[in-house]
Image (cartoon, grey):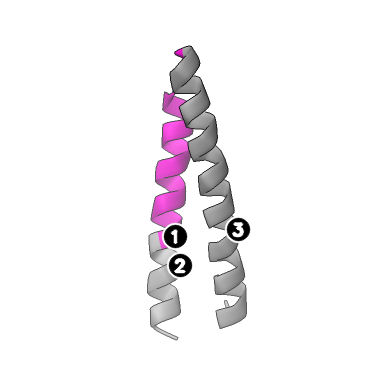
């Protein structure tokens, strides 16, 4: 991936992360099932780490 592509992907993931965090807060309020959202958030965190690492090596 090129630097701009990585930066764009990081930005997309950040927006998705924020959206999921908001959804998680809503589910906590109504005592919904949290594990699927928590799993998605964890996966996004791992992908962000990998992308930042890749960006640092460019």
Upstream in the sequence, badge 2 or badge 3?
A: 3
**Res 8 quadrant in image:** bottom right
- Decide which of 39, 21 is in the foreground and name it: 21
> Mark 3 sits on what residue?
12
Do tag 2 and tag 3 residues touch (Cβ < 8 Å)?
no
Check disc 2: other Cα within 10 Å, few if <14, some if 14-19, many if 20+: some
Categorize mark 3 by other alpha carbons within 10 Å: few (<14), some (14-19), many (20+).
few
- State the residue lying farthest toward the top: 31
Above or below: residue 56 compared with residue 18: below
Q: Nearer the viewer, mark 2 or mark 3?
A: 3
For the residues labelled 1 and 2, the Cα–Cα distance comes to 5 Å
Label 1 Cα neighbours within 10 Å, binned few <14 / some 14-19 / many ≥20: some
Query: Number of numbered discs present?
Result: 3
Q: Are marks 1 and 3 in contact (CB under 8 Å)?
A: no
> Can residue 32 be seen here?
no
Q: Are the residues tagged 1 and 2 within 8 Å (C-beta)?
A: yes
The residue labelled by disc 2 is 51
Q: Nearer the viewer, residue 29 or 13?
A: 29
The x, y position of residue 39, in whole percent, is 42, 35
**SS at circle 3:** helix
User: Magenta segment, principal secondary structure?
Assistant: helix
Residue at the disc numbered 1? 48
Q: Residue at x 42, y 25 (%)?
A: 35
Write down the region rendered in magenta.
31-48
List x then y, in percent, for residue 12: 60, 58
Quadrant of the image for the C terminus? bottom left
- Residue 32 on the magenta segment: yes
């Amino acid at each position: 991936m090129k630097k701009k592509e990585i930066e764009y992907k990081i930005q997309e993931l950040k927006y998705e992360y924020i959206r999921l965090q908001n959804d998680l807060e809503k589910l906590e309020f109504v005592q919904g099932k949290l594990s699927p959202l928590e799993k998605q958030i964890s996966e996004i965190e791992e992908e962000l780490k990998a992308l930042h690492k890749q960006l640092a090596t460019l």
